[in-house]
Amino acid sequence: MLRFTTAGESHGPALVSVLEGMVAGLPLLAEDVNRELARRQQGYGRGRRMQIERDEVEFLSGVRAGQTMGSPISMLIRNRDWKNWQDVMDPAPREGDPDPRRRAVTRVRPGHADLTGLLKYDRDDARDVLERASARETTARVAAAAMCRRFLRVRAPNSPRPSARRWKSTGPVPCARPVTRSWIPSGFRWRIST
């Protein structure tokens, strides 16, 4: 079973992605992940952040000599914009500082996770929430997904690729667990692309 965890804030020093459960011996280079990180940045954003950041992964653990080791894979993606936010996002309290929580966000943004996070974590400053619930945080998720994509390319190179144009029915849904199979409607068929 694969499991990933992310850490870091949008304007913090770096984002971290940890992927557990990857097999040992999978050929893997930083370029494999960087290629997917570059694809992520091809979209359109409202701010200048996409022009500021040039995402590159640094493996901290789990990869040696171009192969996975079977242990958790830790990936670090540095935030170049951190230098502009150090006084706001510094984790250490500053002695004698009259305003230790600079640039506090006290008005929630409609359609964002701000209000939910403020209520869940009982915080007064929405910055604590929005730093994690940001588009920048998806970088760590893309890094984990890039590893999975690499696994599929190497271990299942002839697997069908999803396509919205051509589908064929392959019969009843295969399911290893009888209990789960009983939940699937009897006439239900699954399809894969060709």
Image (cartoon, rainbow, N blue to C red):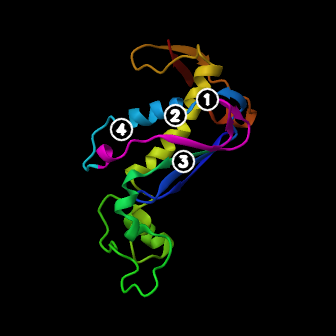
Is residue 147 positioned above or below 189 on the image? below
CA gap between label 2 and label 4 equals 13 Å
| Front of the two marks 1 and 4 | 1
CA gap between label 3 and label 1 equals 15 Å
Q: Image point 60% across, 24% down: which residue?
A: 152
Crowding at dot 1, Cα within 10 Å, few <14 / some 14-19 / many 20+, comes out as some
Residue assigned mark 4 = 41
Q: Position of residue 66 (x, y in %)?
A: 65, 29
Q: Residue 28, which numbered label?
A: 1
- Contact flag, marks 3 and 1 (Cβ < 8 Å): no
Crowding at dot 3, Cα within 10 Å, few <14 / some 14-19 / many 20+, comes out as many
Q: Nearer the viewer, residue 16 or 52?
A: 52
Q: Position of residue 41 (x, y in %)?
A: 36, 38
CA gap between label 2 and label 1 equals 8 Å
Q: Position of residue 182 (x, y in %)?
A: 68, 34
Could you tell which of marks 2 and 3 lies nearer the N-terminus? Answer: 2
Could you tell which of marks 1 and 4 lies nearer the N-terminus? Answer: 1
- Contact flag, marks 2 and 3 (Cβ < 8 Å): no
- Contact flag, marks 2 and 1 (Cβ < 8 Å): yes
Q: Amino acid at mark 1?
A: Leu
Q: Amino acid at mark 2?
A: Val
CA gap between label 3 and label 4 equals 17 Å
Q: Secondary structure at mark 2?
A: helix
Residue assigned mark 3 = 76
Residue 183 visible within the image: yes
The magenta segment is 49-73
CA gap between label 1 and label 4 equals 21 Å
